[in-house]
Amino acid sequence: MLKRKELYTKYIGFLHNNTMSFDELALDLFRFQSRFNPVYNSFLNYLNTDIENVTTLEEIPFLPVSLYKNHAVKSGDWISNIVFESSTTTGSIPSKHHIYDLELYISNAKYLFEESYGKLNKYYFLALLPSYMEKEGSSLIYMVNDFISNSSGKFFNYDYNQVLKDIREYKGGKQIVLIGVTYALLEMAELVRKPINEVIIMETGGMKGRRKELPRQQVHEILKKAFSVNEIHSEYGMTELLSQSYSKGNGVFSASKTMKFLFADIYDPFSYVDVGRQGRINIVDLANIDSCSFLSTDDLGRELGNGRFEVLGRTDESDIRGCNLLFVP
């Protein structure tokens, strides 16, 4: 049986040297987590899973993300380095992700951003994340803070006019990235009076109960018009994951190197739909070595081929989440 240290070594080899395939590493993680993760092990036993006969990703049962609300999902017995906690609407229970190695998350987030956008030091980050700044344990805050530390930028709360002032007065020569929670970007958009050019607007989703839920396309059209940009970028991530994927426009995401997205039939979680058809998003996140790499989300989406996908909304029974989701009619 593989040990944690060996899996870390394999993961780094996969990430930087392609020493093994995605599926090979995923199956190694499944063997490890099915044995040493009590929550996942109980889930597999409940389903009467024959662990030794699981040989493909499609045969792996995916753990519902809702279990992170009431259970410490940990592979092994260890003291948490930090606990990431999801943003929530009033009265809902936050998800908690126990982290064994914070540096793995930080270095992984940097690698995946640079995989999509190039070196961090090319960018000037303006972070408009008020809801996340108001509480401790936000994985998004840790990620963006590291981006700023490796390049340059600032955090803002609700001071929208100051953000606009900084954008217009910036003379540093780097590409500006304005990364923000959706409701804050919409509120700031209402204050824009002059065109703003050459800025990457990246929404992380979430109305936090502050505004009416809108279709993603409508939100993007509002933001494009207000900020005078051709596309709105998006980041797909959540508290229960240690990896992120990005969209550079039209709501089309590209799966990052450490993630695979499988789309399960809404009424049969053990069957997968064809390319182009709507299904529940199941995610393999290879970076979740110490928790669970196989998560069934409350998100609906569809595969577009070649690692591309769309996020279409939430399943009816799910809570309003603080991650990258907008209502789709």
Image (tube, grey):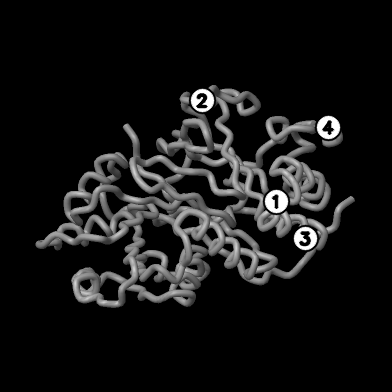
Nearest to the eye among marks 3 and 4: give it.
3
Disc marking residue 275: 2
Q: Nearer the viewer, residue 147 or 282?
A: 147
Q: Nearer the viewer, residue 321 or 190?
A: 190
Is the residue marked by circle 1 packed among few (<14), some (14-19), or many (20+) residues within 10 Å? few
Disc marking residue 50: 4
Nearer-N-terminus badge (4/1): 1
Amino acid type at image mark 1: Asn
Rounded to the nearest angstrom, the CA distance separating label 2 from label 4 is: 28 Å
Rounded to the nearest angstrom, the CA distance separating label 3 from label 1 is: 12 Å
Rounded to the nearest angstrom, the CA distance separating label 4 from label 1 is: 30 Å
- The quarter of the picture where residue 199 lies is bottom left
Nearest to the eye among marks 2 and 4: give it.
2
Q: Marks 1 and 3: in contact by CB < 8 Å?
A: no
Label 3: element kind: helix
From where the camera sits, is residue 130 visible? no
Label 2: element kind: loop
Label 4: element kind: loop
Amino acid type at image mark 2: Val
Please tell me how many numbered marks the rendered image carries: 4
Q: Position of residue 30 (x, y in %)?
A: 76, 44
**Residue that label 3 marks:** 9
Q: Which residue is rendered at x = 74% and y = 32% of the image?
A: 56
From where the camera sits, is residue 189 visible? yes
Nearest to the eye among marks 4 and 1: give it.
1
Q: Marks 4 and 3: in contact by CB < 8 Å?
A: no
